[in-house]
Amino acid sequence: MAVSVSMLASGSRGNCAVVASASTKILVDAGISCRETFKRMKTLGDDPRSLSAILITHEHCDHIYGLAMLAKKLRLPVFMTGATHQAWARALRDADGQRPKLEKFERFESGHSFQVGDIAVKPFTIPHDAADPVGFTFRAEGIKVGIATDLGYLPVSVRDHLRGCDVLVLESNHDLEMLRVGPYPWSVKQRVMSRVGHLSNEALADFFTNDYDNSATFIVLAHLSEQNNHPEIARRGAEKALSARGGLFNNRLLLAAQTEALAPIRL
Ligand SMILES: [Zn+2]
Ligand SMILES: [Zn+2]
């Protein structure tokens, strides 16, 4: 029982999770404030100062909002791709055009595995409208964790990376009908629905029905839209698709929340 996954926050107002082995603790995205990250880790009985590194999926605000402060305060190495780093630094230029600096920036490339302590990390490309967005799988102590949110659809390559995961964190962003009739301007609706937007409940259910390998002990629905989704609709859609495969019995289905941390998943 030495690998854990804690969803600290999930959704368009900030994303942050902790993937930990007995000796290594990785923060995946830093989309809530430093203060809030500290607070939520402490609520779970976790110490932010025990973090080993921060990994960033892409430069959208809901994934990097607290990054500069967290990296500075905790003096942690920050791993992201070169293009994501460029985009992040460009967006955060001050009035004089000065770019922010990370004390310990570690560059990785999508498709190339690297090691953080005893956790093997594999970043893979996802279809999303950012500079160089990635999802991750993590392997430690015989356990595999997969995280893929912020993606317009699930390409074959992503489905391949997600095979054999014991914990799967997947985007269930919107209900198509709620998005269609909802309050967003048409241009935003189109962006969300596009191949580089966000994954719908329906697209995720299709994956569960047709391609999911039933390997996960825990499935976490993540990055739910507050405007265009409802937790119960997302849950029911996923449950229905999973039970059609006879997989529900094996799978514990959880929903990550925006406003509070989820109790740690331990394996
Ligand atoms: Zn996002
Ligand atoms: Zn995004």
Image (cartoon, rainbow, N blue to C red):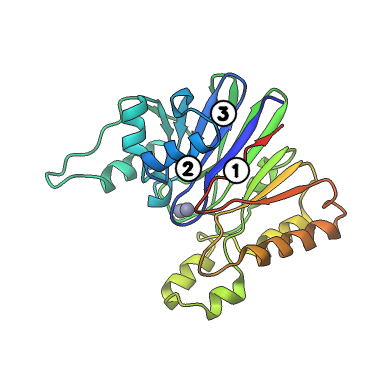
Mark 3, Cα crowd under 10 Å, few <14 / some 14-19 / many 20+, is some
Count up the numbered dots.
3
Q: Quadrant for residue 139, please give it.
A: top right
* Mark toward the start of the polypeptide (1 vs 2): 2
Q: Residue at point 62% right, 41% down? A: 263
- Residue labelled 3 has its Cβ within 8 Å of some atom of ligand 2: no
- Residue labelled 2 has its Cβ within 8 Å of some atom of ligand 2: yes
Q: Nearer the viewer, residue 226 or 95?
A: 226
Q: Residue at point 70% right, 47% down? A: 219
- Residue labelled 1 has its Cβ within 8 Å of some atom of ligand 1: no
Q: Which mark is residue 245?
A: none
Q: Residue at point 69% right, 43% down? A: 160
Q: Residue at point 53% right, 68% down? A: 193
The residue beneath circle 1 is 147
Asked whether the residues under the numbered discs 2 and 3 touch, taking CB atoms below 8 Å apart as contact, a structural biologist would say: no
Asked whether the residues under the numbered discs 1 and 2 touch, taking CB atoms below 8 Å apart as contact, a structural biologist would say: yes
User: Disc 1 marks which amino acid?
Assistant: Ile
The label nearer to you, 2 versus 3, is 2
User: Disc 3 marks which amino acid?
Assistant: Ser
> In whole angstroms, how far apart are the C-alphas of marks 2 and 3?
14 Å
Taking 62 as reference, is 254 left or right?
Answer: right
Q: Nearer the viewer, residue 247 or 9?
A: 9
> In whole angstroms, how far apart are the C-alphas of marks 3 and 1?
15 Å
With respect to residue 137, does 177 lie above or below?
below
Quadrant of the drawing holding the C terminus: top right
Kindly state the secondary structure of the residue where label 2 is placed.
loop
Q: Residue furthest right?
A: 246
Mark 1, Cα crowd under 10 Å, few <14 / some 14-19 / many 20+, is many
The residue beneath circle 2 is 57
The label nearer to you, 3 versus 1, is 1
The residue beneath circle 3 is 113
